[in-house]
Amino acid sequence: MFVVFRDELVDSDEIRKTIEQDTLFKVETDLTKASKREDVMAFKLSIETKKIDDKKRLNWEDDESVDYFFEKAESLTSDFLTMFPRYTVQASRAYKWDELDDTVKLVVVIANIDIKLKKLKLDILPRMLKQVD
């Protein structure tokens, strides 16, 4: 799906391929169409916990361990902005640990800077989180 970033059209499928080739993340689902906006891209991602930190193991019973892995996964998505035209903002939130695959699942949304970061974090990102398991 094509998304408008100011005066540029960006193909979400191309971004999906770039994310999978150039980052540690796997794109589980392209949620761009589900955003129902022409100026927002969204993806459901996963990342193996050993790629986040190969020395530690996520312990679901320990809140500090969960916070560490979730925050680290979210911070790794900040590199996505280099894949987009200038003047874009992004927000992400880890929401689940898949024990079988030992992966952290998260949603990332990217939009034109005309959409305020506050709206992205408080409106669009929570809506996209409702779209995933």
Image: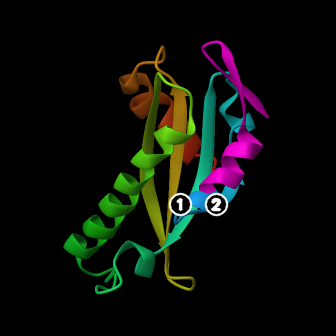
Residue 121 image offset from top left, x and y in percent:
40, 33
Q: Quadrant of the C terminus?
A: bottom right
- Residue 45, by quadrant, is bottom right
Crowding at dot 2, Cα within 10 Å, few <14 / some 14-19 / many 20+, comes out as few
Tell me the element at label 1: loop
Residue 99 image offset from top left, x and y in percent:
50, 83
Residue 30 image offset from top left, x and y in percent:
70, 48
Mark identifier at residue 23: 1
Mark identifier at residue 122: none
Labels 2 and 1 touching (C-beta < 8 A):
yes
Q: Nearer the viewer, residue 82 or 104?
A: 82
Crowding at dot 1, Cα within 10 Å, few <14 / some 14-19 / many 20+, comes out as few
Residue ranking furthest to the left: 64
- Identify the residue shown where x is 61% and y is 54%: 19
Q: Amino acid at mark 2?
A: Glu
Q: Amino acid at mark 1?
A: Thr
What's drawn in magenta, residue-wise? 1-19
Is residue 72 magenta-colored?
A: no
Mark identifier at residue 20: 2
Q: Nearer the viewer, residue 120 or 1?
A: 1
Image: 16 above or below 1: below
Q: Quadrant of the N terminus?
A: top right
Residue ranking furthest to the right: 1
The reply, left or right, for residue 100 in relation to residue 28 is: left
- Residues under labels 2 and 1: Cα distance? 6 Å
Is residue 5 magenta-colored?
A: yes
